[in-house]
Structures are given as C-alpha cells and as structure tokens.
Image: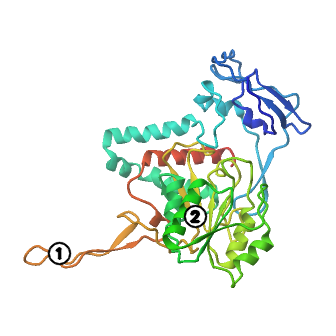
Amino acid sequence: MAGWKGKLPEERLGCCAASDEARYDQDGEIFFLEVRISPTPLPVAPRNRNEPDGFLPRPRRSHPLPLAQLSASKKNKTIKSTPPLDIPALRRDTPGCAATLHLNNAGSSLTPAPVHAARLAYLDTELILGGYEAADAEAGAIAAVYDSIARLLGCSPGEIAACESATRAWQAVFSAVRFTPGDVIMLSEIDYGTTWASAQLAATLFGAAIELLPGTNLHGNIDSAALAARLNDPTLPRVALLVGTHVPTNGGVVQDVETLARCARTAGVPFILDACQTVGQLDLSVAGEYGGNAPCDALIATSRKYLRGPRGAGFLYVREHGPFWHAVPATLDVWSAAMVEEPTCEDDRGAVLESPRYAPKAGARRYEVYERDYGAWVALGAAVDYALNLGL
C-alpha cells in the first residue's frame, strides 16, 4: 500500500478507486488522500446509470460541490462563471480510465476519444490519398487549428506557429535572439532543464551570462522593485532575454508572470513564457497590453499535457510587432521562407548565373517547418476545441 497526503481539488480524483480514502474539509476540498496500490488489477465495479462498464467508481462526497469555479475571461479582467464539469461524461470520453489509474498529466495525459478519432480520421485520409494530397484535402481543418488556439489564448491566428513540440518551439524562438558577449539571460530555478541547457550553450558559444531572477521564492512571488531595478540599471550588463515558467513540472508553484511581463516590457527586454504546464489546466490569456494574465512576447506550449492531445505537436505564440515578430530564427526552410527573387537564366553551358533569394515569412509562420505531423496537429485542434467546450 502506498500513501500520499496533500490538498487536491475534487476533479483530480476522477481516476481513483473505491478502495482509496479521501477526506474533505468544510469547503468540499480534499485535505487527505490515500491511494492504495494493489499488485493485482483492481476489480471492475458493476455499472450504474451514471458510469459505463469498465470505469472505476469515484469516491462519494458527503456534501455538494463548491460554487461554480471562477476564471478570468480571455479578453478582459471580468470574471466569468464556469459550469461544473460532468465528471462521468469526461470519463466516458477517456477510454484509458477503464484500464489504469493515471496520475501523470504533467507528463502526458490520457487522450479523450474525440481527439484520438480526429487523428485517426486524418491518418485514414493519408492512407487513401497520400501525405501531400491529404494535407491539401484537409487544408481547412489544418487552418482551423490556428483559430482554435487563438481563441484559447485570446490572440490572433497569425500570432500562432505550429511546432512538433514545445521543445521545438523553444529552440526556434530562442535561436532568434542574437547574443553578444556579456549579454545576460535571466532565468529562475524552476525553469525546465531544456531552458537551462540552451542558456548554458549560448553562454559557451556567444559569451552570454546567466543570472537568476531577483527576489523569487518557492511560492512564485517576485520582488518587482528588485527586478525592475536590475533590468533598468545601466551600470550592469544588459539583460538580453527574460525567461519565465508559469507552472513548473513539479512543486506546485504558479509564477507571477504578470509582474515579469510588466517589468520586461517597461525595460524593453524580450520575455519568453513557458506555459507547458498551464495551457489546459489554468485560464490563460495573452490578450492586450496587460489585459491578459500572461502578456508575454512569446509563449511555448505542448499538446500532450493538460490539453490532453497527442504527442508530437505543440505551438508557439509570438506577439504581433513584439521583439520576436521580425526576428529571424537560426534556420529556415521553404515553408518558413519565401522566394523573393527567381534564379537568373542559364548561360549557354547550362550554368545558373545567380541563385534565388529567400526571405523569412512575416510573423509567427517564420518559426514553422514544412515537414511535421499534420495528423497530430489536427488532433491538437480537437483537444483545444474539447477544452474550450468545457469552458476553459
């Protein structure tokens, strides 16, 4: 038997077995949870009218749910009411709930059946038509994913780039920063290992330096006065990039990204936000100058975590006319760049007199590449739509 103690919201218990123990406080939240792990599969409970065959029953609570959850709207600071989630319906949409106790949403969630079906449907089209032809036939579905992500974040579709993962999104936008010797990359201790690895490589290759965000603590609070003073101090090395992680992989910290964004914007320092653990779990908006709760210059996110999409897909948000809008990533291809000058005609020996010239596409699309998993991208769109329909 394994035990775990801590405060969890009720909806996180959707996959717990009846033999697990949960105690509730006066607000209807769990203050004690003990998960009993058996070496043999747990028996499947009989079906009732609310839960289908094969689904483990949820612990029953002794009093009703708290009032409707509140979340900030995407376009402004007003508060909207989100209806309570229909947990049995969500479990019916998630076949994996019948087979496993899955507690790894921070890594890769169980995918809902509608999301899986969207990916299979695209693959079936590829099976019949071929890869290029399927992308042409499904061009409308592929384009619609940009619209869905824009609705989720409160931005425009042109500010979204399709990426194969959040790591690829990070590498693309980070490579657009041109560091010079002595430039400072400002990180925090909760940033992901890939962020640190990239920053350390930039320090090695370009002579940049790494500094920790001043005044941060394990609760995600930021000393805004100390940060503003550091960013605007002309006697200290220039801060070329500020990186923030909204929610880290573990620890439960929710970083004060509004303060980070305000300080960075005032000082003219580019700000990249890692929202991999946020998108799909917390309300998130990049809308407006400071109208959203994450007004960053660039944002990276993945499909596979709390959005509950497939692996192999992610996206990058780039603020229109922000510091990354006209920046150029380290690599381009025939998708992210367009031919602006044709090659000159061949001479009498068949030699090309002058090569063609390419220029990066405008906006976020310059961070994309041509070859990617379009089926996973369409499934990501289905996952985003699923989350939006739940009121996220």
Q: Amino acid at mark 1?
A: Val
Q: Nearer the viewer, mark 2 or mark 1?
A: 1
Disc 2 marks which residue?
Answer: 156
Q: Which mark is residue 352?
A: 1
The spot of residue 154 in percent (x, y) is: 64, 61
Q: Nearer the viewer, residue 188 or 27?
A: 188
Residue pushed farthest left? Answer: 348
Dot 1: element: loop
Q: Is residue 206 visible?
A: yes
Q: Name which quarter of the figure residue 5 lies in.
A: top right
Tell me which label, 2 or 1, sits earlier in the chain.
Answer: 2
Q: Is residue 157 visible?
A: no
Q: Nearer the viewer, residue 9 or 244?
A: 244
Dot 2: element: loop
Q: Amino acid at mark 2?
A: Ser
User: Is residue 69 toward the left or the right of residue 105 in the image?
Assistant: right
**Above or below, comparing residue 352 to residue 215 in the picture:** below
Quadrant of the image for the N terminus?
Answer: top right
The spot of residue 309 in percent (x, y) is: 55, 43
Q: Name which quarter of the figure residue 59 lies in.
A: top right
Q: CA distance from mark 2 to mark 1?
A: 41 Å
**Above or below, comparing residue 2 to residue 269 in the picture:** above
The spot of residue 7 in percent (x, y) is: 81, 39
Marks 2 and 1 in Cβ contact (< 8 Å)? no
**Above or below, comparing residue 104 to residue 206 in the picture:** above
Residue pushed farthest bottom? Answer: 234
Q: Which mark is residue 57?
A: none
Question: What residue lies at 68% left-to-right and 78% top-to-bottom?
Answer: 267
The spot of residue 49 in percent (x, y) is: 71, 20
Question: What residue lies at 50% left-to-right and 73% top-to-bottom?
Answer: 206
